[in-house]
Amino acid sequence: MQAVVDGVVESIVESTKSVFKTMISMDVKSDAPFYEEERMIKTDVMALVSFTGEYNGTISIFCRAGTAIKIASNMLGTPMNALDGVVKDAIGEVANMIAGNVKTGLIDTLGEMTLTIPLVIAGVSFSISTFSGDYEAIVVSSLSCSSNDSWLMIPFDADGEKIYVGLMVKKIS
Amino acid sequence: MSKVLIIDDSGVMRKIIQRNIVQAGLLVDQFVEAGDGREGLEKVKQNNDLNLILCDWNMPNMTGIEFVKAFRSSDKKTPVVMITTEGGETRTEEARNSGANGYLTKPFTTDQLLRKLGDYLLVK
């Protein structure tokens, strides 16, 4: 399982760099991944895409409101001023592209997977409790179940802005 | 007069595609937008002079591949290019077999967009 996680992390790093360089005109640098208990995560924006197949899980972007606004501004080529629907749409699309590229890059090792449409949640420094431990209903059960699970967080620095791409993955027996 | 329908559930992505088409020097007089495959079919009915359709894959209500199949049942000619995060040989083959003419994976550069769409639109 560790080899699978390492492969997904490597793919997330490459995909994130590619998406930010190509679509957002930002060079990002990755740092060492770490595990974070879900209840310890505080974020303004969370954009998640779940995948199902031989392995089920979720890839999610976590960032501050200002970072999300800057990303959306760069994507659209026009300054955005508030964490509105357009900004949330943009961050969701970033998560979608990262997850889609991870999926494509890992088809040979993880098999065919189905991706969900991105789900974006925004607030002010909210905490999360997404999963019940049963990954089969990730999106449906989100934000209503508490969990002691940990996210594998991959930190990125984009022109001084901190972005985290989180991963939860489980093999379906 | 060239008219392009862009079907994508992300309004931001629809704008990015339009901006990249303009930056690539491809000549488009009018963009028509739809947020999913179902709306795409409605826009097709309202616009019988489309030169090109660009279509995402994963969308609510009706996916891109469902749209292509439904669209091809009545229109065999208007080119459809999928622009999606869904890559891989299985997906591209499914799209081709369903009637899509081309396939572009997100993220894409302006040059990649130009190469994919240059066969269907005039270039400055």
Image: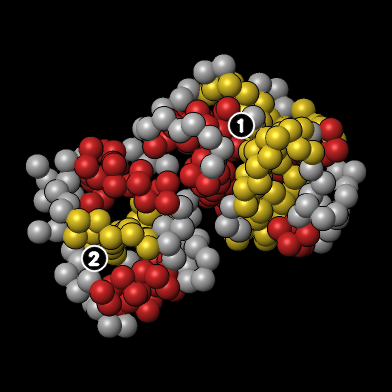
Q: Is residue B110 above or below residue A48?
A: above
Count of marks, rendered view: 2
Residue drawn where x is 28% and y is 41% of the image: B20
> Element under label 2?
loop
Left or right for A168, reference A67 = right
The N terminus of chain B lies in quadrant: bottom left
Q: Residue furthest top?
A: A160
Identify the chain of the residue marked 2, using the numbered disc in the image: B
Q: Which quadrant of the structure image shows residue B22? A: top left
Is residue B31 shown above or below A42? Answer: below
- The Cα atoms of the two marked residues, 2 and 1, are separated by 40 Å
Other-residue count near label 2 (Cα within 10 Å), few / some / many at <14 / 14–19 / ≥20: some
Q: What type is the residue that disc 1 sits on?
A: Ala
Q: Residue at x 67, y 59 (%)?
A: A52
**Residue shown at 57% from the left, 16% from the top:** A160
Residue A111 falls in which quadrant of the image? bottom right
Location of mark 2 (residue): B79
Q: Can residue A14 be seen here? A: no
